[in-house]
Amino acid sequence: MKRPPTGLMVAAFWLAVWQLVSMAIGQEILMVSPVSTFLTLLRLMGTAGFYLSVGNTFGRILLGFLLALALGAALGTASHFSRGVRLLLAPPMTAIKATPIASFVILALVWISSKNLSVFISFLMALPLIYESALAGLDGADRKLLEMAQVFGVPPGRRARAIYAPAATPYLLSACRSAMGICWKAGVAAEVIAQPALSIGDALYRAKLFLATDELFAWTAAVVLLSLLFEKLAVKSIGWAEKRLSGVAK
Amino acid sequence: MIRLIGISKSFGEKRVLSGVNLELPAGRVTALTGKSGSGKTTLSRILLGLEKPDGGRIEGVSGLKTAAVFQEDRLIEGWSALDNLRLIGISKEEAARHLAALGLGGDWDERAQKLSGGMRRRLALARAMAAGAELIVLDEPMTGLDEGNRRLAADYVRARRGSAAVLVISHDPEDLALLDAGNVFSLDDCENS
């Protein structure tokens, strides 16, 4: 007999635990059951506002992440080739990592419109992760292959495809996975504080305000699912880009 | 003509080369021999611009196109044999010709990591000879090759060296004879101590 996948069994176990805890508490306003959460999510998915909120939040977080990916990779490359840039960037990257998200959110609200705050916060949280991984990957490029490329006078573009891209990609993929989760958490948290119209953060805030715990859980479930989807998309895209970059010696 | 004049090199307290003089005529194969640790690889790295000498000078290398077979094969493991050759900027057809000449014609699409030790060595040799270089350093180029492939590789080097100055590092007098090495320079004989 074919055994069910382990992942499904683990998910079923934790859903059962959630259901039992909800039944033990017996008050849906304190702990919504998975069934109610699913039904509320279905109800929300029947409204246009749901898709507008998801689209707006998804777009802002994706934009923040992509900006961090582009700038983090560019700065990581610059730091690999220039000791001056590396020294110059070390303090701000450390400061960004050590500063609480709430401090940035409150400070950034002074400079940036509530609509664009989650873009900026997602960008800021992902930037040091991407930067450090790009730098570590490039620093780890095979020295002997680089010497070979130097002796043969291999031009920089081909060196990047043959030696640097394969060295940096595993680091970047790992950083993207971590950055995805952080972008979602920080981006939605920023929206809860800034409350831009038609966003997941605003919907979460309103659910809390009106004690609509079922909606709070349903939106949270939507964020978790979107975050997983986002991660899979990014990892597939980078894998595809890596194959395109390093697969042929054109 | 490439001239190395009074080349010295130390690593920390250890003196590896001391006042070495060597001439590499264009269109000829020069052999570099010496005991293990005598500085053969260090001298070749200086010649290729990968190390700076502590003393002495090199004449005739400025602007020269260089190529090498290193002690290790130094291939792009995830790339095919053909793409490893195309890395140095030659056409697909030219790369295929070089692979065929070294008995790798049927393996052009195979990733480097899947090739046997002898095939990898021949691929590294093809890369060095296909680059159109004016200075070619071959560090133990026959490592891992059986008798038949040693002869094939030697014929290939002799046929394609053209006007390049070739420096071969080898312990094996038979390999040096096969490669038609006219000058033999031993680091054991010079004042290097």
Image (cartoon, coloured by chain):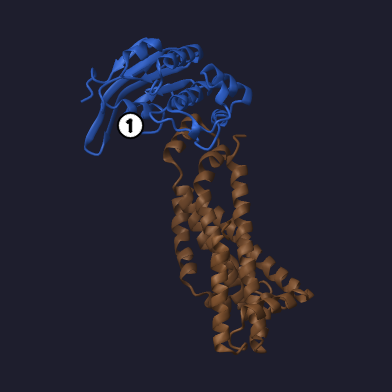
Chain colours: A brown, B blue
Foreground residue among A47 and A19: A19
Residue A18 x/y as whole percent: 56, 78
Tell me which chain the residue with mark 1 is part of. B
Q: Give the quadrant of the C terminus of chain A.
A: top right
In the image, B105: left or right of B7?
right
User: Could you tell me which residue is drawn at 62 percent across and 89 percent down?
Assistant: A29
User: Could you tell me which residue is drawn at 61 percent across and 81 percent down?
Assistant: A33
| Whether residue B65 is situated above or below residue A178 in the rendered picture | above
Foreground residue among B184 and B101: B101
Residue A151 x/y as whole percent: 46, 30
Whether residue A175 is visible to the viewer of this picture, yes or no, is yes
Task: Determine which quarter of the picture holds residue A222.
Answer: bottom right
User: Could you tell me which residue is drawn at 58 percent across and 79 percent down?
Assistant: A19
| Whether residue B29 is situated above or below residue A7 in the rendered picture | above
Q: Which residue is mark 1?
A: B53
| Whether residue A135 is situated above or below residue A114 in the rendered picture | above
In the image, B24: left or right of B90?
left
Foreground residue among A159 and A171: A171
Task: Determine which quarter of the picture holds residue B136.
Answer: top left
- Label 1 Cα neighbours within 10 Å, binned few <14 / some 14-19 / many ≥20: many
The type of residue carrying mark 1 is Pro
In the image, A231: left or right of B144?
right
Residue B68 x/y as whole percent: 44, 26
Residue A181 x/y as whole percent: 56, 66
